[in-house]
Image (cartoon, coloured by chain):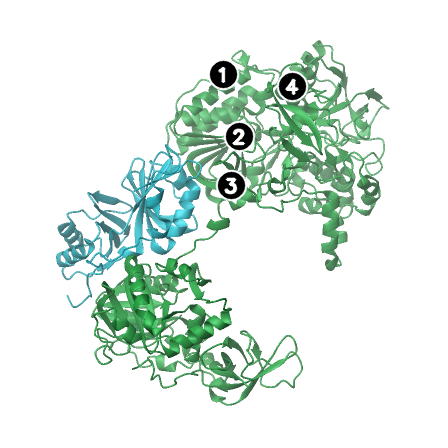
Chain colours: A cyan, B green
Amino acid sequence: MTAVNVYQQRPTTGAKAESSLHHADLASLVGKGRKNAGVTVREKKLLGHLTIRGDGHDPAFAAGVHKALGLELPGALTVIIKGDTSLQWLGPDEWLLVVPTGEEFAAEQKLREALGDLHIQIVNVSGGQQILELSGPNVRDVLMKSTSYDVHPSNFPVGKAVGTVFAKSQLVIRHTGEDTWELVIRRSFSDYWWLWLQDAAAEYGLSVQA
Amino acid sequence: MSQINRLSNGGRIDRNKVLSFTFNGQTYKGFEGDSLAAALLANGVDIIGRSFKYSRPRGIFAAGAEEPNAVLQIGATEATQIPNVRATQQALYQGLVATSTNGWPNVNNDMMGILGKVGGKLMPPGFYYKTFMYPQSFWMTYEKYIRKAAGLGRSPTENDPDTYDYMNRHCDVLIVGAGPSGLAAALAAGRSGARVILADEQEEFGGSLLESRESLDGKPATEWVAAAIAELQSMPEVVLLPRATVNGYHDHNFLTIHERLTDHLGDRAPIGQVRQRINRVRAKRVVLATGACERPLVYGNNDVPGNMLAGAVSTYVRRYGVAPGKKLVLSTNNDHAYRVAMDWFDAGLQVVAVADARSNPRGALVEEARAKGIRILTGSAVIEARGSKRVTGARVAAIDVRAHKVTSPGEWLDCDLVASSGGYSPVVHLASHLGGKPIWREDILGFVPGEAPQKRVCVGGVNGVYSLGDSLADGFEGGVRAASEAGFKAVEGVLPKALSRHEEPTLALFQVPHEKSTARAPKQFVDLQNDVTAAAIELATREGFESVEHVKRYTALGFGTDQGKLGNVNGLAIAARSLNVSIPQMGTTMFRPNYTPVTFGAVAGRHCGHIFEPVRFTALHAWHVKNAAEFEDVGQWKRPWYFPKNGEDMHAAVKRECKAVRDSVGLLDASTLGKIDIQGPDAREFLNRVYTNAWTKLDVGKARYGLMCKEDGMVFDDGVTACLADNHFLMTTTTGGAARVLQWLEIYHQTEWPDLKVYFTSVTDHWATMTLSGPNSRKLLSHVTDIDLDKDAFPFMTWKEGLVGGVPARVFRISFTGELSYEINVQADYAMGVLEQIVEAGKQYNLTPYGTETMHVLRAEKGFIIVGQDTDSSMTPDDLNMGWCVGRTKPFSWIGWRGMNREDCVREERKQLVGLKPIDPNVWLPEGAQLVFNTKQAIPMTMVGHVTSSYAHNSLGYSFAMGVVKGGLKRMGERVFAPLADGSVIEAEIVSSVFFDPKGDRQNI
């Protein structure tokens, strides 16, 4: 594999790791806040994130992805979740693979092996983004305050995922369960999103889950 | 004085819940369920303010959004002040504090009242233009005076403690107005299963049914309202928004709704609750059920407190249990207004007379009134009212409407309340916000919405459908239509039965004639809020203003927050008669959002304070904060600017940081630089086409600086790109250019060269970048890495992989300071741990963190440009003396090549980037200063360039600058001058832009 430079970017020695919301110390907020909060937030941090690009119309590409991951290539605006792994359509030639912490290097190698000589790109973006999971009866209200995209279940069913405007920036919204949603947020914007979500959820009550 | 005008029973108020409030400092009591206006009337408050122009006393005139006079300032504290609140729309709450917005020293004894009488003459119509347009410099003075005198309300000077926000909503059917037709439409649409939003501006749904005499299915109409609301509440896809004014109808069925969630609860919102919310609604279909607004008649002194809109009298009697007077004279041109006389009569109050302009009215309501023994004077109207602070009488006389003449002397009737009804105007505002011209209908004497491309349906009163039964049916049908057009199957429904009765047409009477000419008769007000009289409109037409838009601007008719709700049609009718044209020929003015005023808090929503704008942080931000960095905003990023120590100012800190880098080693957080991962067999060729220089021969393991130009040949970004593998590159961009460079690459790939096999992905946030720079950087790095740092093993402009602080890293030997430098990239999650180890190891080398200011100085000493500071989108690589970075022999054309070879781009004497050395080494050349070759010339001098970067505090020991000078590269050693605004002149020598280490020995060791 001399055509691309693939290497293990995550230390294996138990080096100090800080998620993009490390400074907010969410762990210390667990159990505080209103009882029966309308919104619960959980940081799904330090996971493996890979951006995969390739020709979605090429059956060989879909087959290769399936061979490597055991997942069908998701179509437009959908996310497929299997256990701790999810594969999401980001654009006509772009997908996001999220795997458990530390599995991204092996996943990239597997994908590259399965995709052979196809023209693709796989990029480790694990350090650049993370997921915030929101659950509870008022998550939809918080989303409605934040995005002009229609989050009603008739337009945004479970399994749908979109990249869209959110407050004054952009992020990815994934509907993963009836009252459960995920936001894929960029590292440098994380503080803004955390401040924004606390504010938007204030009237419904916000709790933090470990 | 305790609620002297409160009726002993009736009204939708809770008499057990007494609320106290103050108006202009005096304390009053009202009941829960009252509007502020109702409570003021209950307490016999006649004068609510002074008029805008003539400073005449004014009282409450209407009961809804159309109220022109009772526009008050609300707020118990400075921080909670809200101007422009209509007392008719504000629910009463305990402790409410309201004040008039004009009248000084107070509304009852107004100094301006005397001035106003003079001022009226001084301020003829058109005074905006006649007075203020010239001389322009006086406007500021006039404005202050006018605003104080006119009293247009004031904004708070302290921060609003409440929360305001936005809510984005989508629906199949948005219904505007919850009167009879709107409720019927909501039931029809809701039953189909469609997503429905029903919004109404009032405290409760029901509209006219809340004060109606009518029954539905033999029961009070309010019972049907309650049942309809209950049914709607049970529908999961129906959203009910009371206290929510649909204020704007925008393109593509996007509507903005101003919802007042807690304004009825108190001066401040309860803790944790939102005060007001802008609902931003995208609707597949819109049903406009905005109803109709009664017009007053225009007669003499029709503005004295005690003159009211007829329907408002019914509202106060029936909905609030308040009688705004004792003895009523009603002046009407239609049947519908007779219910007012009967409501008054049924409340046990005295109806002095009804003046009906029609000669022989025989409608069912008229007969009903006759049967009650109410005195009806036909062919007559109230000609003028009498009284100064309150109506004491009204003169009713026979009139000839066609001839516009009074035909009898008439009689003065003793009364304290004159109610007038001149017919009804459909509320076409929303239907016209997008420019749809309303159409005049002679049969109802009103404008109805015209054809419009919007996907909307108009129902009920706004359509000119006035009788209750027809209005319900029209609403239901509209709801069915809207839902089915949105793709839902409508369900059959049964509507409640309303009594249908014979009603006769309204007579076209707008301005009531007077024996004297309009100009000499007592003032006949058309627009009470803007103090526009019938005489003013006639004057406007006499002065040649024939277009309705000109009449509006000349007189201020329907200006501002009023939006012509009461006066528009009357004003048009008067202008039309004066010009001898018909009303439809006259046309209407534009209606604009917002329908009623919106607070700035609601407009701002949550985009304020600490979440006003996104702020981006690097993974090392906490360390910077701990080390007392001052921060600089770079785009949305917070970057350390400098790290002051022991009370240093910026200059001292920067000088120290510069010296540390030149002498030993400094540390910079470079994480904000844009980073783009590029893969694909054609990646190299793509780089050849987007960069000005050549990339064919860049070996794996090496890095190269590149310039990017737009098609015009002007530099737009720069950075270093490294070859990671044959088909794999890592591009860096400027901090501010990261997003637009990625977009630029995608655009060119997708539109121009889709055949090239290459993909791009941003990794800006993935990698954290720490730059070690200075002669000791190698020694320092060797303590924390397993990479062979030998100068031959790891030379300048190459990169290596290895562990730094135990974390896998890519280290680039590139330099922006001119010193030996290493840029260490690690996955951002692990950066803090790596940084801490570097800092620990760096102690023995006086490792000094530095910020963007020192970075700017050090790079300038080396003559390295900053795109956007030393360039301004008008500079080619040659202008920047960077011709070495242009691949003039690349086989395939590339972006900017053609542009930079245009005749103008290759001429002599273009402005070129050079170094500037002030002759006095202690003088700082201001950035942006214009340069001239010769100061002995007249102003304006011939400018030959300007200063782009300038630093007095640096490692060189003398002030220096970079700048562009015409033909500068051929003028080395010559002098330029910077004449400054204060008259001083700074002289400088044109020198090479590389001030430090011109051979580059220090970075290449």
Q: Are marks 1 and 2 in contact (CB under 8 Å)?
A: no
Kindly report which numbered mark, 1 or 3, lies closer to the viewer in this rendering: 3
Q: Are marks 1 and 3 on the same chain?
A: yes
Provide the residue designation for mark 1: B496
Provide the residue designation for mark 4: B321
Neighbours of disc 2 within 10 Å: few (<14), some (14-19), many (20+): many
Chain for disc number 4:
B
Neighbours of disc 1 within 10 Å: few (<14), some (14-19), many (20+): some
How far is mark 1 from mark 3, CA to CA?
40 Å
Chain for disc number 2:
B
Q: Are marks 3 and 4 on the same chain?
A: yes
Q: Amino acid at mark 2?
A: Gly
Sooner in the amino-acid sequence: mark 1 or mark 3 = 3
Kindly report which numbered mark, 1 or 4, lies closer to the viewer in this rendering: 4
- Viewer-closest of A172 and B280: A172
Q: What is the secondary structure assignment of the residue under circle 3?
A: strand
Provide the residue designation for mark 2: B177
Chain for disc number 3:
B
Q: Position of residue A115 (x, y in %)?
A: 15, 57
Q: What is the secondary structure assignment of the residue under circle 1?
A: loop
Q: Are marks 1 and 3 in contact (CB under 8 Å)?
A: no
Sooner in the amino-acid sequence: mark 1 or mark 2 = 2
Q: Is residue B675 left or right of residue B54?
A: left
Kindly report which numbered mark, 4 or 2, lies closer to the viewer in this rendering: 4
Q: Quadrant of residue B321?
A: top right
How far is mark 3 from mark 2, CA to CA?
23 Å
- Viewer-closest of B426 and B257: B257
**What number of labels is visible?**
4
Kindly report which numbered mark, 3 or 4, lies closer to the viewer in this rendering: 3
How far is mark 3 from mark 4, CA to CA?
34 Å
Sooner in the amino-acid sequence: mark 3 or mark 2 = 3
Q: Are marks 4 and 2 on the same chain?
A: yes
